[in-house]
Amino acid sequence: MGWSAAAAALVLTVLAGCTPEPTQAALPPRGGGPYLAWPTTRSDPGNFDFNWNGRFDAGGRDVVRNNTPNDVWPSRDSAYTAARYGYCGGVAGSVPDFLTPETVSATLTPGQTLNMTFITDEDTPPGHVVFSICDRATNVSQECFNEHLLRRVEDGNLIDFSWDERFFVKPGFGVYHPTFHMPEQLTCSHCVLQWHFVGAGECLPHGYVSFGFPAEYGIDKNKPACGDVFPEEFWGCADIALLPQDNPQGLPCDDEDQSGCMVVLGYFASWSYHRPAPYTFMIEHIDAGKYTHLAYAFAGIDADYTIMPGEAVDVDGGRYALFHTHVRQRNPNIKTLLSVGGYTFNADSRTQYRFSTMVASQQRRATFIASLIPFLRTHDFDGVDIDWEFPGYLQNGGSPQDRDNFLTFLQELRQAVNSEVTQKDALIVTVAVSAYRGIAEQAYHIREMHKYIDFINLLSYDLHGYWEPQTGAHTALSSTDGIDVQDSVAFWLEQGTPRQKLLLGFGTHARGWTLDSPANHAIGAPASSPSRPGPYTDEAGLLAYYEVLEFEQAGFITRFDNLTQTMYTYYGDQWFSHDSPFTIKLKAEFALSQGLGGAMVWSIDQDDFLYGSPLVQAIRDNLPISPPPPPASDGDPPLNLTEIIIIAVVGVLALIAFVVLFASCNKHALSSKPTLDNSGVGAEYDTPVPVIPVLKLSEDDLESETSTDDSSNGTDGLPRRRRRLKPRYYDLGEMEDEEDPMQKAEDYVTTKDGVLVDTDGRMVARFHDGEHDEIYDYDQRRRRETDAAHRRAQAELVAMRNGKYVARHYDDEDITV
């Protein structure tokens, strides 16, 4: 927050102190009980245009004791009776229930003091009020409030230092201004402030007997102890914001002033060029203008503890050089990093020990660092990213000493970088870190490590995956179990990480499961195995975002989950958790509200890069990122109008000539199909063969797709009709290595409206919408969907039978069930 914001906060505080105290007669009518007047409580009677009555009071006499048996605190929903109260004071199921976020009524900075206004009426007993904060606006839980209990400021009012969260009130009407400290490391663009008043008129809460109350507080020490359930209590919620002073919101980010700009660091999985077309990701596909930093993943540590490239082709084949030529031509300001490690390197039994063994020895650390720095300079990298997953993680070859040794390694690496004699900028050092509290606490000296690195890349994805026996949101922004992006960021900030060094991780991939029962497809559904491999990434339990989109076009169902603020997609027993441009926007807004340094993307090759990388674009659209410079040009002058007209005319004439020639040469080929030959090519098969569809289904799965049955009988008791799909197969003969099986298959079938049919117009490849077997109408969908349909059709088309490729065909037969 800048000077203007600080001044505004000061004015609000002064105004709060100078506002005339309300009198009892001036208060709106209400059913009785104390309440928070500022920041404005959601249940403030002034918020409603009807008479306040006891039904909407926050709590009241015997509410908790009578309506929440076996509980010491109310919860969100009415689990026992219709009168159960929620954590913001409203009766469950009532309107209003005060669970919906409202307008923020106070904006502060972490560590600032908040002077509140709390009002009691003439019937209020003596007692105390406590305040707590939940650092999210939705999916709030009492557990979240309990993590951030506010502490009193010594403001001259009665205080018990053994219970310094309590503000005491006297019996009867009163207007109080309790002052509390905001948490030092907590930030939120929309927090929920909860107040909770406990009366001491009928019994004594914990700690009352031993504390010396002045007589005017009316505490009778002869009353019995309350225990854990109080006969009279009131509570409610208000909406506030805690924004860091260095929050970049509102600061400029343009060509002239980049004080408010953030970082977008993208990881490039260098092996992605091995993936099949059309998603073979080449270096030329990198849109460098979308990023401020790019990390080339991965290099490794050799057996002699020196740096080694991930693949020999990186050096010998010139890929490092090609990478830098391409990205710097398109973005001269780009910073490039060589990422060392990665999950596979750390999980492979042949290499998983190398990080741990290297950092454990001063000599091996020196050997690695001495090889790393000249390697980076030789291959023109601007820095290094250390992706060790994770120090101290025993199942990946770690040891309990890794935490201390890793800090020593970072200290020595920074010292070597700073001592390097060079005319170039100092090398950048970044570290990829776990988002799990449990792992991070054992892996890192968080309060120290940030001193030696430039950015911390938070791996805030893969929070759940097929290694768990139920589905989960792997990029959850919020949750009920605390395994989410918000909790991870809060933890790293609480441990002293500078905000500007923390980059929030964004995943462009999906995590997938095979459901135990297709009928149960919600988050948390039982799932005992990973999803089947996708057609391009070919990895169980994972899909690239472009594969998710293709599955959506093929009939998979996608839903938004309000709790986790993520998407999930399913069909049959296949289930995937992922983000979308909309949910990426929510995460980007969160990163901005926290004043973080920016975003990290794993990985740029898994976004829908053929169509503009929409996930990365959503990050750029919602974070202040410096505009990329124009690509480098060759200096040629622009074309004049005459040259443009000549080129256009020549192009049109050439196109007309090509169309005429193509039609003439292919007239026969377009209107005929090959006939059977003596080798049996083109012969029909009625028996099943192994096929290779888009999801790599098993033969049993495929045979189960060959019929549908809405129900055995209709509501009138008469039998229904069922469509049976009879599979047929066409022998395409032996294939030469250089032949394209897709092309040869199309010698026997024709693509018609995105569906493959044979010479008799019978369907060869079909699509399923989950309820009925139909040919989809792709004409009304966006341009990429026809292509997606054709690719799916081709994927289902080609199969193997005894080493020969065959085309699969379905016949429709209507029969009576």
Image (spheres, rainbow, N blue to C red):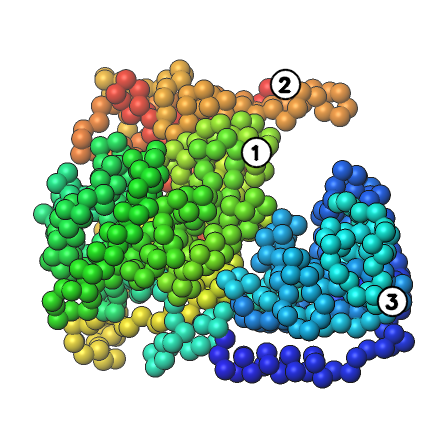
For the residues labelled 3 and 2, say whether their Cβ atoms are less than 8 Å apart.
no
Q: Residue at x 45, y 38 (%)?
A: 465
Q: Rounded to the nearest whole Å, what is the CA distance between mark 3 and mark 1?
A: 52 Å
Front residue of this view, candidates 513 and 37:
37
Q: Is residue 585 above or below residue 312?
A: below
Give, as a three-letter code, the residue at label 2.
Thr
Q: Rounded to the nearest whole Å, what is the CA distance between mark 3 and mark 2?
A: 80 Å
Q: Which residue is mark 2?
A: 816
Q: Which residue is mark 1?
A: 525
Residue 503 x %, y %: 39, 59
Give, as a three-letter code, the residue at label 1.
Ala
Give, as a three-letter code, the residue at label 3.
Gly
Q: Quadrant of residue 623?
A: bottom left
The tag earlier along the polypeptide, 3 or 1, is 3
Neighbour class for label 1 at 10 Å: few (<14), some, many (≥20)?
some
Neighbour class for label 2 at 10 Å: few (<14), some, many (≥20)?
few
Q: Rounded to the nearest whole Å, what is the CA distance between mark 2 and mark 1?
A: 36 Å
Looking at the image, is mark 2 or mark 1 nearer the viewer? 1
> Which numbered tag is attached to residue 791?
none
Residue 624 x %, y %: 42, 70
Q: Is residue 281 in view from this perspective? A: no
Front residue of this view, candidates 204 and 113:
204
Q: Is residue 169 left or right of residue 565?
A: right
Q: Quadrant of residue 287?
A: bottom left
Q: Which residue is mark 3?
A: 172
Instruction: State the residue lying farthest toward the top.
Output: 687
